[in-house]
Image (cartoon, helix red, strand yellow):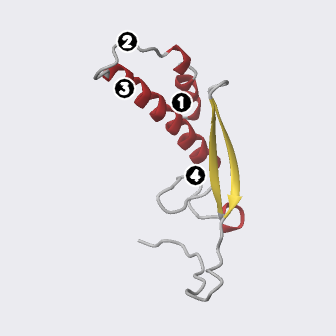
Amino acid sequence: GVKRIDADAKQLPHLSVTDKSLVWNTDLTETLELENLMINASITMHSAEARKESRGAHAREDFEKRDDKNWIRHTLGYWDGATQSTRLDYRPVHSQPLPDGEMRYVEPVDRVY
């Protein structure tokens, strides 16, 4: 999946708008929508491939259990338009409740269906 989406994303610079009108330009709208969808698809695919666990809606057959030791963190995806590529970074999850004591800390647990 990642290799295929990367190959498709590399074609984005060849995308062009043929309709040059300024009113109701659906060609322009569809071109912008396709670019946005391709960028988000690439970031989603790279993020899913990098996460070596199953958690919530992100389920993998090769990693059936969640891995709290390595994966309680947020994935940040960045698109580089110059190279048509995705870069991933991470930031910690804020797991402690607000300091005013409004709510108690809730331990993460596996979802069981």
What's under tag 3, amino acid-wise? Answer: Glu
Residue to which mark 1 is pinned: 5
**Mark 2 or 4: the one toward you:** 2
Residue at 66% in and 83% down: 99
- Please indicate whether residue 54 sits to the left or right of residue 68 in the image: left
Towards the viewer: 24 or 103: 24
- Please indicate whether residue 9 sits to the left or right of residue 113 in the image: right
Residue at 61% in and 89% down: 101
Kindly state the secondary structure of the residue where label 1 is placed: helix
Marks 2/1: CA–CA distance? 29 Å
Towards the viewer: 40 or 30: 30
Q: Quadrant of the C terminus?
A: bottom left
Residue to which mark 2 is pinned: 20
Residue to which mark 4 is pinned: 62
- Give residue 74's mark: none
Choose top left, top right, bottom left or bottom right for residue 108: bottom right
**Mark 3 or 4: the one toward you:** 3
